[in-house]
Amino acid sequence: MSSQNVSEKPTGPLDVGRIREDFPILGRRVYGKPLVYLDNAATSQKPRQVIEALVRYYEQHNANIHRAIHCLGEEATAAYEEARAKVARFINAPSPECIVFTRNTTEAINLVAHTWGRANVGPQADILLTQMEHHSNLIPWQRLAAEKGASLRYIGLTNEQTLELDGLDELMHDRTRILAVTHASNAVGTINPIGRLVKEAHRNGTTVLVDGAQSAPHMPVDVQAMDCDFFAFSAHKMLGPTGVGVLYARRELLDEMEPFLAGGEMIKRVTLEGATWNDVPWKFEAGTPNIADVIAFGVAIDYLTGLGMENVRAHEMEITDYAMRRLRQMEEVFIYGPPDVADRGGVVSFNYPDLHPHDIGTILDREGVAIRAGHHCTQPLMRILGVSGTARASFYVYNTLEEVDVLVEALGKARAFFSNDTP
Ligand code: PMP
């Protein structure tokens, strides 16, 4: 169950040429053109180390975990729990018991809303969100508010789609039970000042959930330094398989929370009358978990750790900066989000005044360039921006400046096609 680090160099720029060799899919052609994959905010591609870990698990170790008294069961259990420890180290959680495996970020947030939320949010309570939240960090709270008769409040946005924090004092008061906020926006790229938000929330006695779906894959994350209460993210956006998410929570919160789903694995003792719950974190992992994918996720974390998350961030800033400079040179392109790359992740969301983002996406696809076009699961944000959607290019460790050139060239073709400039 060993994994392989891709880089002997713990620091320094990423060796993108070498990284690309680890990703079989990057050798694909799409409509006869080399694939340029710029939809990483939706999901990332997987290195062969992760793919091989899945095959190795099923070929060599497959068994159910925690209960088996045989060699395979013990190997599978050890590998599964080792992956939990890797996740804990990756985000600097104080212990592996603070890590709960879920299916994805969405399930992790639902877990908190259903368990902590039901116990702690009453009719007089406020739930504080922001106007840039992904539907996954919006709908669970809307449902909880409707169920409990609680109120939803929103931190608004500036013209550059950063959080408008001037009126925060008025929004956050003694009835504000939770602040649920994204660390980095999947739709416009903004990185939010989580440290400041957590400080102000805690001063107010407000619990904080951070949606880390777009930060954990792309930058160093330290949940203890951040001091957040909950932090949620997905394996599939960070080189890992689909079907695995993570909920980090402060240990004392997990101890006091009721289970989310009930059944096997999450119990200690069962009688015909009732049951007692397993210890944290297994109390929250009912039924047979996604063993193979969790183990392969551990290998994805090894891969990213081998690259160094500071280097990942530096690489993405370089590509984002280049992409923004190239796009700004194109007439009429409008780029959303903060102008400074230091304030944004590797997401560039843009529009042409009279081109539908879907049309842009379709033409780009024919050139082999995969971007995302639409509302990015942030419909309220799109409404505030006054658009039905945007075109979004999002970058990761294997993207190159040359791929940005291909994107820009393909955009030029889309522009020419729709303005009938072509002969
Ligand atoms: N939050 C943010 C900011 C996201 O970008 C995403 C995925 N687009 C999610 C939540 C939901 O992630 P998942 O679909 O893996 O549950």
Image (cartoon, grey):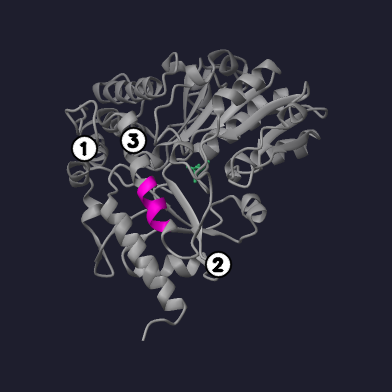
Query: What's under tag 1, amino acid-wise?
Result: Glu
Q: Is residue 410 found left or right of 373 in the rendered image?
A: left
The part of the image, by quadrant, that contains residue 206 is top right
Q: Are marks 1 and 3 in contact (CB under 8 Å)?
A: no
At x 52%, y 49%, the residue is 187
Q: Which amino acid does label 2 sit on?
A: Pro
Spatial CA distance of label 2 from label 3 is 31 Å
Residue 205 visible (yes or no) = yes
Residue 31 drawn at (x, y percent): 28, 70
Q: Quadrant of residue 289?
A: top left
Magenta segment: 321-327
Answer with mark 1 or mark 2, whichever residue precedes in sequence.
Answer: 1
Mark 2 vs 3, N-terminal side: 3
Residue at image position (52%, 17%) is 278
Query: Dot 2 corresponds to which residue?
Result: 353
Left or right side of 281 for 9: left
Q: Quadrant of the N terminus?
A: top left
Residue topped by disc 1: 59
Q: In this view, does 138 lie above or below 72?
A: below
Q: Position of residue 346 (x, y in %)?
A: 41, 44
Name the amino acid, label 3: Ala
Q: How far apart are marks 1 and 2 (CA)?
A: 53 Å
Dominant secondary structure of the residues highlighted in magenta in the image: helix
Q: Nearer the viewer, residue 262 or 355?
A: 355
Q: What element carries label 1?
A: helix
Crowd around label 1: few <14 · some 14–19 · many ≥20 (10 Å):
few
**Residue 2 x %, y %:** 20, 27
Name the residue tied to disc 3.
314
Dot placed on the residue nearer the N-terminal end, 1 or 3: 1
